[in-house]
Image (tube, helix red, strand yellow):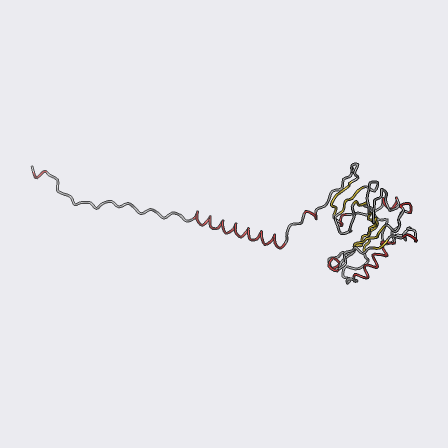
Amino acid sequence: MEQNLPEPQAALPPLRPEPPKPKRQFGQWFLLVAAVIALAAAIVFLVLRFIDPPAQPGADTVERNQTPGLDGVIAENMPPEQLVLADCLRGFKSPLDPQTVVTCESSHNAQLIGSFDVEEGADAEYPGPEELLAHSEDLCKSVALDPSAGIDSTWTYHFSRPSKGTWAEGDRTITCFLSLSEGNIRTSLLPATDSDSADSNSADASKSSTPEAKEPQDQNSGNSN
């Protein structure tokens, strides 16, 4: 009986689990690269914004109301550079301020009566504030006004002109205004033919038709430094 028993076998070593395979690092590298790109884009955006800031809302073009209501308002907060010849202005204080443009039949206290370009080349040197001031006075007083408008000494000339800084940027424009010291009017200061033509008060405009005994006053309100 004992001869039929199986022979004893050697003990097998215990099974050991295989070590886990290392996980791929592709996902982590992708996230790292994406984070670096996002950080670089944010830095570039901030640098560009600092160097070239977005335009201010005031620089946007102001729309003109083609069918003004009973108040006569055509546009409010109109930047000076967007004004056009014969614009009548309500609440005018300085040619450098944003203006309220109204119809000339409605109440207003000032009007843009002329705009001129100084005949100097792009490379011409700045002539100086005193010379530009005298030139501005001569040009503004050359504008032909409507004798029936009743211009007298209660009116004041204002003009904007290039400063040394804007001259270097190519500015050569002199803009002329007439304003009332007190009160308002409801008519244009320009002859009807001049009000309808944006080119009528060019550098060749005729001498003012204002009575010599009651000329408007001069007021230096230009841009010169």
Q: Nearer the viewer, residue 125 or 184?
A: 184
Name which residue lies at 70% across and 48% down: 58
Instruction: Give the number of marks.
Output: 0
Q: Is residue 211 left or right of residue 100?
A: right
Position of residue 100 relative to residue 116, above or below, is above
What residue is shown at x 41% (from left), y 49% (from top)? 25
Give the image location of residue 145, x and y in percent.
88, 49
Q: Is residue 141 left or right of residue 35?
A: right
In this view, the residue farthest toward the left is 1
Position of residue 30 measured from the top left corner of the image (x, y, whole percent) = 46, 48
Q: Residue furthest front?
A: 182
Horizontal and vertical percent position of residue 197: 85, 46
Looking at the figure, which quarter contains the N terminus?
top left
Q: Please tell me in which quadrant of the rendered image residue 6 appears.
A: top left
In the displayed structure, would residue 109 be above or below residue 127?
above
Q: Nearer the viewer, residue 206 or 138?
A: 138
Residue at the spot 75% in from the left edge and 46% down from the top edge: 78
Image position, residue 68 (x, y; %) = 78, 38
State the residue in front, 46 or 160. Answer: 160
Q: Quadrant of the C terminus?
A: bottom right
